[in-house]
Amino acid sequence: MQEKELIPHLYRSEFRKITTVLCRSFGIEHISVAEDVVSDTFLLAAETWGLKGVPNNPAAWLYVVAKNKAKDFLKRETLFTQKISAEIILSNSASNETDLDLSAQNIQDSQLQMMFAICHPAIPPEAQIGLSLRILCGFSIDEIAHAFLTNKETINKRLYRAKEKLKHVKVKIELPSDAGIDKRIENVLTTLYLLFNEGYYSSNRNVVLRMDLCLEAMRLTHMLTENESTNKPFVNALLALMCFHASRFEARTNPEGELILYQEQNTSLWNRELITQGEYYLNKAATGNLLSKYHLEAAIGYWHTITDNDTQKWEKILSLYNQLLMVEYSPITALNRTYALSKVYNNKKAIQEAEKLRLDNNHLYHTLLGELYTTIDYTKAIQHLESALKLARSAADKKVIKDKINKLDKVKNT
């Protein structure tokens, strides 16, 4: 791998590891300092490797430099003598220099603990996702801004406010007690769920970045399954859901980045390995008495990986949607249910249910009604699709809707 490719690759894989260990060492109140130390380390790597060549073990070089920079920071700042020095002397009386533990186990532990710190209920969900992308996933500010379709200034302000809140609340970087995990893990799962959805349903046309978001959410969720304290049935259910959705990722867009609807996807592009993994985690989730929304969504995801398009499949999906709406009602879930309803019964019955939702400002609502009216009333179908076109934000959604309108116009005028 060439130097130009190597540094971005290492930044993505190592930034998050070193930063979480430094945060754990410095304390959450110095999260920005930890980021600066690691960023300076990569800047030095770019300068040094350009002149002297890439070292034999680039990752190890980064770890050594990061350790040295951390020690320099601790020596240089008054923080060392006022707040940290006493703790270091107590824990390591032989030396006043801290020796950062960058072993694989400590990195894993630090990331898991940081996950619970970032997902503190005092932090707004959007900021939790931003901090997770930055600290736990190693995304640059540019990439985060790109993912949220906003600018760097907005992201910097959002992250700054979140970090200040963490300082104010004095959140500790540690794995909570079993009771604390039970209280906080829903926040963690919600953040990971939203992080995955940001990639899977994002209007961003950068397919590589979108897939990276999904993979990072899956990596962090998998980390929860590897720890005995956090390996709970609903965690496995969420990971199963992610696997099922990710299995269809490549089939959801064409080479131009345009969206391909589920019923039109090339099933040969579905990733069978991810489907098998999803089945594995769904089976692991089938313990205990709790039936979470993640269990039901994962089961719906599973049935969507079945290529047969018979009534039995859609009856199963409809039944699961009915249960999901009882566990946690959502207008979008109710809207998705009406599509399954049309498959089990007919479009007329589905239209009656959909129109009760009155989601007039939602482009998905009008898109679905446009689809359902196609076999009943061309004029109404086109009216709904034109409403959807006005409300849609992404170019990909607009392209799909325009194509549908053009097809209906041709049929109507023949």
Image (cartoon, grey):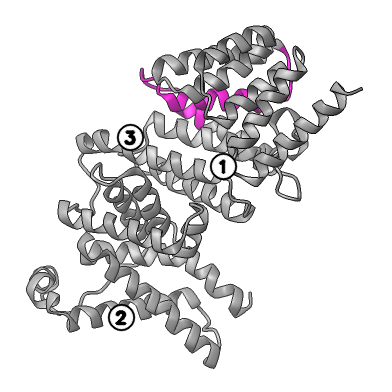
How far, Cα to Cα, is label 2 from label 3?
Answer: 36 Å
- Circle 2: residue type: Lys
Q: In which quarter of the image is residue 285?
A: top left
Determine contact: label 1, label 3, CB under 8 Å.
no
Q: Residue 186 carries which label?
A: 3
In the image, the segment drawn in magenta is 281-310
Q: How far apart are marks 1 and 3 (CA)?
A: 21 Å
Q: Where is residue 64 in the image (x, y as percent from the top left)?
A: 37, 79
Give the labeled residue for mark 1. Answer: 200
Kindly report which numbered mark, 2 or 3, lies closer to the viewer in this rendering.
Answer: 3
Q: Which of 50 and 351 is in front in this view?
A: 351
- In which quadrant of the rendered view does residue 135 lie? bottom left
- Determine if the magenta segment contains residue 242: no
* Mark 2 crowd level (few <14, some 14–19, many ≥20, 10 Å Cα): some
Which residue shows up at 65% across the image and 35% down it? 389
Q: Which one is nearer the viewer's eye here, 412 or 305?
A: 412
Where does residue 225 sit, x and y in percent of width and height? 41, 40
Looking at the picture, which amino acid does disc 1 mark? Tyr
- What is the number of the mark on residue 116? none
User: Which quadrant is the N terminus positioned in?
Assistant: bottom right
- Which residue matches tag 2? 69
**Residue at horizontal 40%, vertical 44%?**
226
Q: Say what secondary structure mark 1 lies in.
A: helix
- Chain-order first, disc 2 or disc 3: 2
Q: Is residue 287 magenta?
A: yes
Secondary structure of the residue carrying tag 3 is helix
Residue 39 lies, in percent from the top left, at 39, 74
